[in-house]
Image (tube, rainbow, N blue to C red):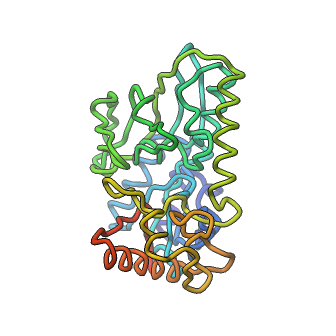
């Protein structure tokens, strides 16, 4: 109860939810209750909440819109800090976009299009936030964040705010210094180029059409479930292992795209986790390659 009061004092009572079902906050539509679900609106509030957790030795986890997250069925014992709708400002100045970490990539790409800025079309259909995209160097269709990030502001575990250049961010395949050092992404400056609005919009529509045709968007999922092994494609390995449509309960390897694990409606986190292990085991048995999950697992299973 004391922690609840302290969290409310830090961010406002209306921004602290108790026993909040995480199924409401993940694209998998799966997850038990978090003890506390906190919605900060500033760097100062994030720092205050993290400090409260540190002092009380309470686990805490930073999330965006939950597009790469699998939360255990028994929930999360601690504090979930969601950097999302209360930190989502987007401002365009010339060829640069100044954007907070909670802004959706899709909305940021749309703002770029409206300003006739090209270079971000690849991100228009990625469901994550800018913060998550910075952390994992999100990419699709031959584009990735490191191509457009000029700098980013981050919060360290010690509460220090750093401004990192593109080079200092160390962005590689699904990694960055943000993930390696467990920083919190706060904001970014994206450098794009002037383009032709109709051409930019046409490219975004083309990529949208490809997604609809090839990806199981009608089901809950966390996007690509496994990272791409060097020299291979995870979906192709899973397909070649004979696992298209493989099910554990209501969790299934998508028949449309084998790189996706989907929730057919009532899948549990335990079923998804079991299916992922089964897939990784089968691919390793057949091809000697161990698939590394791109989905993050937190909480109690």
Q: Residue at image x 57%, y 15%?
A: 194
Of 290 and 25, the residue lying toward us: 290
- Using the image, determine if residue 96 lies above or below residue 101: above
Residue 176 x, y percent position in the rendering:
32, 44
Query: What is the tally of numbered marks visible in this picture?
Result: 0
Q: Residue at image x 65%, y 32%?
A: 203
| Residue 54 shown left or right of residue 203 in the figure | left
- Using the image, determine if residue 54 lies above or below residue 190: below
| Residue 185 shown left or right of residue 213 in the figure | left
Residue 177 x, y percent position in the rendering:
29, 44
Residue positioned most to the bottom: 249
- Using the image, determine if residue 79 lies above or below residue 205: below
- Using the image, determine if residue 141 lies above or below residue 82: above
| Residue 91 shown left or right of residue 175 in the figure | right
Q: Residue at image x 67%, y 23%?
A: 199
Which corner quadrant of the image does residue 17 belong to? bottom right
Residue 197 x, y percent position in the rendering:
69, 20
Of 71 and 85, the residue lying toward us: 71
Of 199 and 132, the residue lying toward us: 199
Of 260 and 111, the residue lying toward us: 260
| Residue 297 shown left or right of residue 288 in the figure | right
Residue 29 x, y percent position in the rendering:
63, 69
Which corner quadrant of the image does residue 125 belong to? top right
């Amino acid at each position: 109860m004391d922690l609840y009061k302290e969290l409310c004092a830090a961010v406002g009572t209306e921004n602290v939810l108790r026993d909040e079902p995480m199924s409401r906050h993940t694209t998998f539509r799966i997850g038990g209750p978090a003890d506390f679900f906190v919605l900060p609106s500033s760097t100062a509030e994030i720092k205050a909440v993290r400090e409260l957790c540190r002092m009380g030795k309470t686990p805490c986890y930073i999330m965006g819109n939950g597009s790469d997250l699998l939360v255990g069925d028994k929930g999360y014992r601690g504090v979930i800090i969601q950097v999302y709708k209360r930190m989502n400002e987007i401002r365009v100045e010339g060829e640069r976009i100044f954007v907070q970490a909670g802004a959706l990539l899709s909305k940021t790409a749309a703002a770029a299009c409206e300003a006739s800025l090209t270079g971000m079309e690849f991100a228009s259909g990625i469901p994550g936030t800018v913060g998550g995209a910075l952390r994992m160097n999100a990419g699709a269709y031959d584009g990735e964040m490191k191509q457009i990030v000029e700098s980013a502001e981050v919060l360290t575990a010690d509460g220090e705010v750093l401004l990192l250049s593109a080079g200092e961010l160390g962005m590689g395949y699904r990694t960055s210094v943000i993930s390696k050092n467990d920083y919190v992404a706060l904001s970014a400056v994206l450098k794009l180029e002037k383009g032709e609005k109709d051409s930019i919009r046409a490219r975004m529509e083309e990529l949208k059409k490809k997604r609809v045709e090839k990806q199981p968007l009608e089901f809950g999922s966390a996007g690509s479930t496994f990272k791409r092994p060097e020299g291979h494609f995870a979906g192709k390995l899973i397909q070649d292992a004979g696992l298209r449509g493989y099910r554990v309960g209501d969790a299934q390897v998508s028949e449309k795209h084998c790189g996706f694990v989907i929730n057919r409606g009532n899948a549990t986190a335990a079923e998804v986790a079991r299916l992922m292990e089964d897939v990784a085991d089968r691919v390793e048995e057949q091809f000697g390659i161990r698939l590394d999950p791109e989905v993050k697992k937190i909480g109690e299973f």
